[in-house]
Amino acid sequence: MNPVRRALEFLFTRVLRSRLGVALVIAVLVFGVIGAARLVSGPVDSTLGLSTRPSQPISTVDPHAGDDGVLSSPPAAVAPKTRPGEATPEQTAGRFTTAWLTGPGSTAEAWQSRLRPLSTPALLEKMTGADPETVPARRVTGAVTLRARTESFVEALVPLDDGRLRLELVAPDGRWLVDAVDWERQ
């Protein structure tokens, strides 16, 4: 038998059907795909290892044309609006905090009845079944601070002995109610 034919027969019957042969075939295919992709993608900047993208960001705004005024003036301060005769957001937050802190030692029904006039229906629903014994603080240690988001939405921060109570208050009709309660341990 011809020696070339024997070598080819050995290659195809023994080597390519073994694990080593399969690994060699996979490696050849992977390197072939990578090589083809490099040929199709075009030249590469060898110093950066990136394609021929511009070195600076493309800008559609002329940086020397002057100020367009978009970011030059800070947004106007928003003042929360309260219906005449109703409690301010600070007062509502203070009253809610006092009622919230009286939870430990009382029944869930009594605790929730104290929170009810200061809460939205959505918050009351979320607090259904809440245990007043889980209130993690006992007393207020500072003044209520507000972050007005809109005329009818504010965030109140109340410092307590073991953290900070964050309340979200809403007043769609000018009467402030607590809509969300969050505890931040310090």
Image: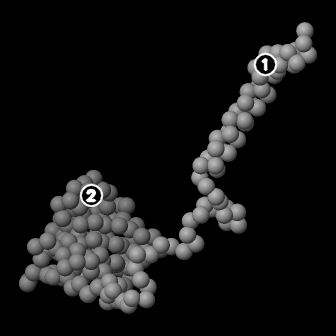
| Disc 1: CA contacts within 10 A as few (<14), some (14-19) or many (>=20) | few
- Residue 127: assigned label: 2
User: Which is more N-terminal, label 2 or label 1?
Assistant: 1
Helix, strand or loop for disc 1? helix
Point 20% across, 67% down: residue: 119
Point out residue 171 in the picture as x, y percentages from the top left corner.
16, 73
Residue 126 appears in the rendering: yes
Q: Residue furthest top?
A: 1
Which quarter of the figure has residue 103?
bottom left
- Residue 12: assigned label: 1
Left or right of 117 in this view: 185: right
- Pick the front one: 25 or 125: 25
- Residue 185: assigned label: none
Left or right of 127 in this view: 116: left
Point out residue 186 in the picture as x, y percentages from the top left corner.
47, 74
Helix, strand or loop for disc 2? loop
